[in-house]
């Protein structure tokens, strides 16, 4: 799959590690494999990216960190358990050769904070300073799943030292435009967007 994307000219791909976190893997009783599966996913993408990279045009790997299936704000799992799981996820992605960490499809600001701080701890332990990108998901209601508006997301996440903020999933470009306009006007960091392509998840 990575090969197919690079073959048509993309500059970067995501790792296939969206579910490599404590809550998702815990449902299959394999949460002890978070690091292993994250590293493997990043390594596969890294190998393909390196095949296409040239001196004039490098290719990058974004380490995908999905939200999992448990929301700490609703008490599904303790915050510390989720944070430590995200740290293992990030550590595996770093070890596998990811160029940046992408916390995506975030629905709960407390869960997002756990993921970002997990990334920061993993980067500190690795002695690296890779970009950390966060994509929140705003539903057609105009808020994240638990009711937070885009302004609240920016206020909560920008101080954590992330490098980019944006949106993905749930809606297409038209529905995202107003939220992106807000970020473009108010964020002091880069803005990113990955809308759904003609469908809604």
Image: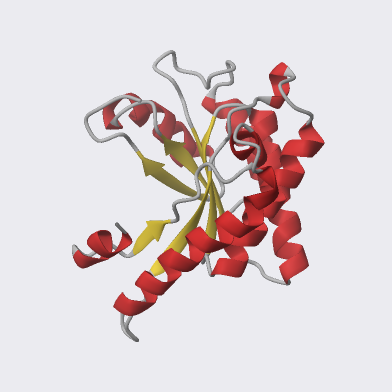
Q: Position of residue 80 (x, y in %)?
A: 81, 37
Front residue of 48/163: it is: 48
**Looking at this rendering, what residue extends furthest in the front direction?**
29
- Which residue is pictured at 71% across the width and 51% down the height? 87
Residue 110 makes an appearance in the image: yes
Instruction: Give the colour scheme of this rendering.
Output: secondary structure
- Which residue is pictured at 25% across the width and 27% down the height? 199
Q: Position of residue 178 (x, y in %)?
A: 38, 27
Report the quarter where the N terminus lies. Answer: bottom left
- 171 vs 119: above or below: above
Q: Position of residue 100 (x, y in %)?
A: 53, 61
- Which residue is pictured at 57% across the width and 35% down the height? 67
Answer with left or right where residue 107 lies relative to residue 179. Answer: right
Front residue of 66/187: it is: 66
Front residue of 161/140: it is: 140
Report the quarter where the C terminus lies. Answer: top left
- Which residue is pictured at 37% across the width and 58% down the height? 13
């Amino acid at each position: 799959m990575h090969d197919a994307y690079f073959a048509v000219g993309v500059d970067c791909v995501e790792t296939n590690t969206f579910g490599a976190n404590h809550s998702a893997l815990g449902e299959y009783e394999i949460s002890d494999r978070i690091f292993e599966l994250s590293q493997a996913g990043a390594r596969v993408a890294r190998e393909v990216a390196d095949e296409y990279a040239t001196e004039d045009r490098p290719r990058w790997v974004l380490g995908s960190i999905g939200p999992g299936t448990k929301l700490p704000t609703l008490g599904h799992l303790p915050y510390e358990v989720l944070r430590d799981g995200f740290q293992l996820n990030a550590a595996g992605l770093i070890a596998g050769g990811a160029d940046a960490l992408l916390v995506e499809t975030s629905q709960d600001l407390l869960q997002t904070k756990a993921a970002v701080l997990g990334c920061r701890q993993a980067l500190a332990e690795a002695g690296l300073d890779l970009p950390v990108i966060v994509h929140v998901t705003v539903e057609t209601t105009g808020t994240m799943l638990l009711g937070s508006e885009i302004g609240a997301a920016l206020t909560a996440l920008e101080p954590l030292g992330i490098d980019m903020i944006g949106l993905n999933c749930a809606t297409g470009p038209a529905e995202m435009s107003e939220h992106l306009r807000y970020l473009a006007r108010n964020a002091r960091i880069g803005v990113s967007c990955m809308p759904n392509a003609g469908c809604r998840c």
